[in-house]
Structure formats: structure tokens, C-alpha cells
Image: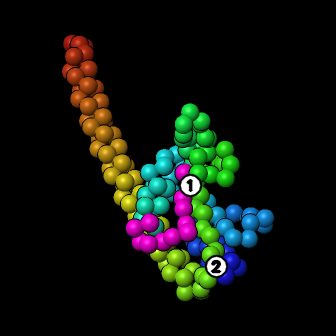
Amino acid sequence: MFSYLSIQLKKLSEAYNERLLHTPQNPISLAVTLKTLDEHRDKAVTQLGSMLFTRQVSGARVVPLGSVQTVNGYTFRGFMSHTNNYPCAYLNAASAIGMKAQDVDLFIKRLDKCLTTIRKEQNCESDVSRADNDETEDVDIEEMGLKLENVILDTPQDSSS
């Protein structure tokens, strides 16, 4: 089942411009990058984890980029990650004993829907952000036009013409 999960995760990750990480020493767990979700903020990454959890997807977890956690006075860098400084957020999925192809298919289907939803939300947010910037740009242009008009009106006119 590990091979089937690997193949399906690879297909899905490529569809979202992500990649399945090469982990030859681990015959149970697989990891997929989450670079395109939101590389500089954890919101979309943690939202994906929450969405999977509420859709009863077990055995998968998301690992945000550079998470730091202090527990009982000990600081853990890259908290929840397999290393202190992994370069991107990722999703970890495990192939469990007794897992069937239909379980993998259901997981892939739910993960796909979650990724699609998050991408749509990100696109809406960026569209709103662009619209806000366009409005600000329009206001700035109008303001510049008014200031220029005032400058032109305040300029002394040559009486000889």
C-alpha cells in the first residue's frame, strides 16, 4: 500500500506544483511540500491541517515552516518537523497496516478538495488585496492631479502673452 500511496501523492503534489519528498530510508511515511500554499505565513498550512482533521483524515499531519515551541524551558526549533531548519512547510502522510487502496483514494480525494478550497480562498484574498491597491492607486492619481492643478493655477501668468 505504501507504493500506491506514494504514486497517488506524487500525482496530486505535481498537480498543485508541489513535490513528493524523496525519503528512501522511511518505508512508512511520505512527505509532500506545501511551498505554494503560503511560504511566509503559517495560516494556510495550519488551515489545511484543520480541514483534514475535521474531514476525519487520520495519519496525516501538516508541519509549518520554522515553528518554534518552548516546553518546560526547552526550546524546540522546527517544532513538529523532522529537522530544525527544514526549508518549507510540508504534509506528512503514513501508510498504516491494514490500509486499503480505497482508503488511499479517499484520503487523496479529501486532500485534493482541501487544497482546492485553500487555493480558492488565497486567490480571493489576493484579488481583494489587488483591488485595494488599485483603489489606492486611483486615489493617489486623483490626488496628484489635484495638486498639479493647484500648482498650475498658482503659477503667475505671463502678461505679455
Residue type for callout 1: Val
Quadrant containing the N terminus is bottom right
Mark earlier in primary sequence (2, 1): 1
Farthest residue to the front: give it.
Answer: 72
Residue type for callout 2: Ile
135 and 36: which is toward the camera: 36
126 and 25: which is toward the camera: 25
Residue at 60% of width from left, 68% of height from top?
93
Of the residues tagged 2 and 1, which is closer to the observer?
Answer: 2
Does dot 2 land on a helix, a strand or a loop?
loop
Colour treatment of the image: rainbow
Local crowd size for mark 1, using a 10 Å CA cut-off: few (<14), some (14–19), many (≥20)? many
Image position of 59 with respect to 160: above or below: below
Image position of 131 with respect to 148: above or below: below
Does dot 1 land on a helix, a strand or a loop?
strand
Residue at 56% of width from left, 54% of height from top?
63
Q: Position of residue 84 (x, y in %)?
A: 66, 44
Question: Is residue 7 at least partly visible in the picture?
Answer: no
Q: Position of residue 28 (x, y in %)?
A: 69, 70
Q: Position of residue 22 (x, y in %)?
A: 74, 64
Farthest residue to the right: give it.
Answer: 25
156 and 95: which is toward the camera: 95
Residue 63: assigned label: 1
Q: Position of residue 70 (x, y in %)?
A: 54, 38
Disc 2: which residue: 97
Q: How many labels, in total?
A: 2
Provide the residue span drawn in magenta: 53-64
Which quarter of the picture shows residue 25?
Answer: bottom right
Q: CA distance from mark 2 to mark 1?
A: 23 Å
In this picture, residue 135 sits left or right of residue 9: left
